[in-house]
Amino acid sequence: MSRAILALLQGDLQAAWQYHPLFPLLIPIGIGFLAQDHLSERMKKIGLWSVITVFICVYLIRMISQSNPEVVYFRPADGLIGRSIILVNEIRFR
C-alpha cells in the first residue's frame, strides 16, 4: 500500500493500481475514522469486517494468480520460516 501511495503522489495512477488496487479505499476509511463518533457500533463493525474481508480476498487472489510477481510473490522457502527450517535441517544432519 505504501508503494501505491508513493506512486499516486508522483501522479502515476497505473503504477499505484498495480501496487495495490485497494488504495482508493483509504479515502472512505479515513472519512469513517474521522466520523467514528457519529457512527453506530453496528456500522463500525460492519465497516471494519468489510474492509478486512476485501483486503484478505484481494491478497489471496493476487497470491494465487501471481499476475504481478514483482509486487506480490509467494516463495515460502525464501521467507524467515523457510530459511529457519533449512538451517535447522542442515545443522541436524551434519
Image: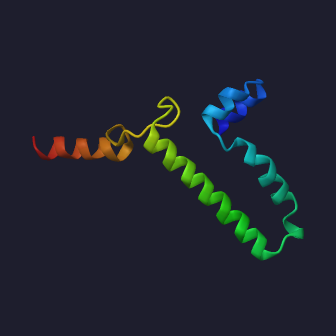
The front one of 71 and 85 is: 71
Task: Tell me if residue 62 comes above or below residue 18 in the rendering.
Answer: below
Which quadrant is home to the C terminus? top left
The front one of 12 and 83 is: 12
Q: Residue at x 18, y 45 (%)?
A: 89
Q: Position of residue 24 (x, y in %)?
A: 74, 43
Q: Quadrant of residue 23?
A: top right
Q: Position of residue 39 (x, y in %)?
A: 85, 70
Q: Residue at x 75, y 47 (%)?
A: 26
Q: Position of residue 41 (x, y in %)?
A: 78, 75
Which quadrant is home to the N terminus? top right
Task: Tell me if residue 14 comes above or below residue 93 in the rendering.
Answer: above
> Is 49 positioned to the left or the right of 69 in the image?
right
- Which residue is outermost to the left? 94
Q: How is the image coloured?
A: rainbow
Q: Quadrant of residue 76?
A: top left
> Is 50 positioned to the left or the right of 72 in the image?
right
Q: Residue at x 71, y 30 (%)?
A: 6
Q: Quadrant of residue 82?
A: top left
Task: Tell me if residue 20 comes above or below residue 34 in the rendering.
Answer: above
Q: How many numbered callouts?
A: 0
Q: Position of residue 80 (x, y in %)?
A: 37, 43
